[in-house]
Amino acid sequence: MKLSLVLGCAFILPLIRAQVPHWGPCPDPAVQPAFILKQFMGRWFEIAKLPAQFEKGRCIETNFTLKTDNSIRVVSSEILKAEQRKIEGTGVIEDIKNPAKLGISYSTVLPYSPYWILSTDYVNFALVYSCTDILRLFHVDFAWILGRTRSLPKSTVQKAMDTFAKNNIDVSRMIPSKQQGCDKKPSEQPWI
């Protein structure tokens, strides 16, 4: 028992240190009603986020493409140390009755992580939330404000922050994403 607890802590502590941990289970926020997956597809730029260890660069964007089997091709990219890094994953609708609750995985061996669309107008902005319970004692969550362009009006960002807060999602540590100087052509490397 002690060995498994030590091993569990050794695996979990690095995740917690880099992310935003909170006591208790994940909140259950409302998601976009009548979500239309096809309208969500396309290119989205990261405007703001809760800090995430797997996102260290700038000019972060994700392109969603609907595949013939109704899964989603997800290609994310960032510029880190003058190199463009890309990673490809797969998205799925986890519950057909609630299509705004997607799951995304960037690995064939890892389970799908929640990727919930809390709100979107499909043409300007989207609010995305992901949360993982750790033994229902605490949770680690991620939140993103996305835009179809590299910037959004301050009023839109503030409204997004208010929406997260109304859903009991702590965004006090949310930071703006760097979307400047993205048009330069860096060399391309896989995102590891």
Image: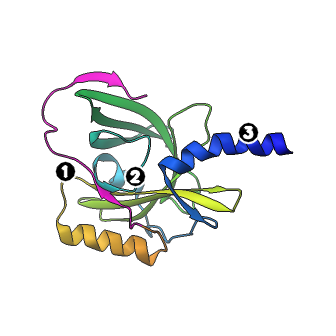
Q: In terms of secondary structure, what is the magenta stretch mainly?
A: loop
Question: Disc 3 or disc 2, which is closer to the eye?
Answer: 3
- The numbered mark at residue 7 is 3
Mark 2–mark 1 Cα distance, whole angstroms, equals 18 Å
**Identity, as a three-letter code, of the amino acid under mark 2:** Pro
Residue at 69% across, 62% down: 136
**Identity, as a three-letter code, of the amino acid under mark 3:** Leu
Q: Is residue 21 magenta?
A: no
Q: Crowdedness of circle 2 by 10 Å Cα count: few (<14), some, many (20+)?
A: many
Mark 3–mark 2 Cα distance, whole angstroms, equals 25 Å
Q: Earlier in the sequence, mark 3 or mark 2?
A: 3
* Colour pattern: rainbow
Q: Position of residue 98 (x, y in %)?
A: 54, 62
- Tell me, yes or no, whether the two marked residues, 1 and 3, touch with CB atoms within 8 Å: no
The stretch in magenta equals: 171-192
Q: Position of residue 132 (x, y in %)?
A: 59, 55
User: Does residue 165 appear to the left or right of 113 in the view shown?
Assistant: left
- Tell me, yes or no, whether the two marked residues, 2 and 1, touch with CB atoms within 8 Å: no
**Identity, as a three-letter code, of the amino acid under mark 1:** Arg
Mark 1–mark 3 Cα distance, whole angstroms, equals 41 Å
Say which element carries label 3: helix
> Is residue 113 something one can see in this rendering?
no
Q: Crowdedness of circle 3 by 10 Å Cα count: few (<14), some, many (20+)?
A: few
| Residue closest to the eye, 86 or 135 | 135
| Residue under pointer 2 | 51
| Residue under pointer 1 | 150
Q: Residue furthest right?
A: 1
Say which element carries label 1: loop
Question: Quadrant of the rendered structure where residue 43 is?
Answer: top left
Asked if 119 appears above or below 178 in the picture, the reply is below
Residue at 37% across, 51% down: 38
